[in-house]
Amino acid sequence: MKIKEKSINNQQPTTNNTVLLLGADENECLPILASLHRHGVSVTAAAPRRLSMGHFSRYPAKRLISPDPNKEPELFINWVEESVKGGQYAVTLVCGETATWLLASARTRLEPYTRIPLVDVSRFYICRDKSRTMKEAERLGIPIPRTYYPDDVGIEAVARAIPAYPVVLKPCISNGARGISYPKNAAELASLYQATRAEYKSCIVQEFIPHSGMQYKAEILLDANQNILAGGVYDKPRFYPPTGGSSTLNSTVDRQDILDLGIRYLKGIGWYGMGDCDFIVDPRDNTPKLMEVNPRFTRSIKILVSAGLDFPYLLYRLALGLPVDPQFNYAKGLYLRYFLSDCVWFLRSPNRFKARPSFFWFFGRNLKDEIFSWADPAPSIAFFIVYVSRLFNKKTRQSMLRSR
């Protein structure tokens, strides 16, 4: 299938349907590869190492080794530019936080050669930096946990203003709950703030929301005019670390109120492309409160793709300026399990035998695995080898097995 359409965004018309997918070592690459393959789109999967899930998948037409965006960011972008200069890739998609940020930062540099469906870097940074995320939410009247900005007023002023402990100390830029701590008093807050700031730079302090409240994710796709092209919500019955972190089990739900809040936020900042809004329902007043916004494909996007919202293909069509039929109907009650991480949750959670659904539920028509698929089983081999090998690195092992 060849695609030819008018020039958009001051780019030359494209006559191919080939996609360059960066970050093919990330979990979210798998539903993207499967989706595009299903629609006849030819994908070149690029990852920093051969032992990657995307390279083991049967779906890519071609596989490339890229520089590691986390270790060599400038070299990575230079490599991307050289790869797309010939015009062989109609669209470039990306997985992973660092790689997505780098691509957004270099978008204007790369746009003469390929379509990149990412918002401009100034809006992207609003969602990458939790301080800016929270300030925009306050401006838009979207509920958030009570938030303090020590980088603006000083940690001493924040400590004096806090009515009760514990509180949550968060780096403004981090991923997967890394760097989050729970100071129990003013002295501990001051000490942890200095240590966290030394490693992560800017921080925010928030009131502690009891974890008995359910957490939700609203995934939303918008075009350049902020029209909503797709949207769905799923919850996080289990997550790791147990005190608050990345999900190990998700399920699709009908929460139009949470979807509406996510849409309101993204439209309020003039968003374009994929956006993921994380909420927690405060059990004290039953109000959904915004926790963060991820300006990228998220690790658990497979659940909504499996439920009927074909985000990867819609984003591909959006990038090319092709018509997109909005999608909002999706299957409710579908579960997605991140099995190895869920096993770590089981080892560390005090609620291991009380969880519903049970940890020991392994099979069912409405249960999917984040990595494994009978249609494409080989990526699970690469994932397992990499996951186990990380346990041999002391620093990585401590991060993977941390309890909070």
Image (cartoon, grey):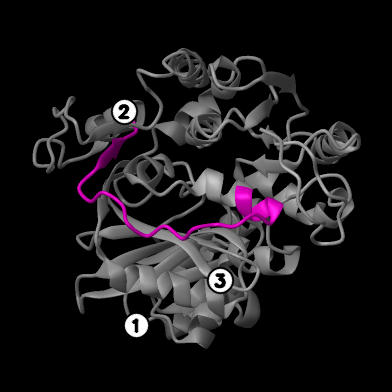
Q: Main secondary structure of the magenta part?
A: loop
Q: Earlier in the sequence, mark 3 or mark 1?
A: 3
Question: What whole-number distance in Å separates the C-alpha atoms at marks 1 and 2?
Answer: 39 Å
Asked whether residue 275 is drawn in magenta, I would say no
Q: In which quarter of the image is residue 54?
A: top right
Question: What whole-number distance in Å separates the C-alpha atoms at marks 2 and 3?
Answer: 31 Å
Residue plotted at (60% across, 15% down): 51
Q: What stretch is highlighted in magenta?
A: 317-338
The amino acid type found where label 2 is placed reads Phe
Residue 53 image offset from top left, x and y in percent: 54, 22
Q: Mark 2 points at which residue?
A: 339
The amino acid type found where label 1 is placed reads Pro
Q: Mark 1 points at which residue?
A: 163
Residue 223 is left or right of residue 309, and the answer is right
Residue 264 image offset from top left, x and y in percent: 46, 77
Q: Which mark is residue 148?
A: none
Q: In this view, does 327 lie above or below 347?
A: below
Asked whether residue 330 is drawn in magenta, I would say yes
Question: What whole-number distance in Å separates the C-alpha atoms at marks 3 and 1?
Answer: 23 Å
Q: Nearer the viewer, residue 5 or 368?
A: 5
State the quadrant of the N terminus: top right
Residue 404 in view (yes/no): no
For marks 3 and 1, give the one nearer the viewer. 3
Residue plotted at (55% across, 57% down): 324
Residue 231 is left or right of residue 359, and the answer is right
Q: Name the residue under label 3.
A: 133
Residue 52 image offset from top left, x and y in percent: 58, 20
Helix, strand or loop at disc 2?
Answer: helix
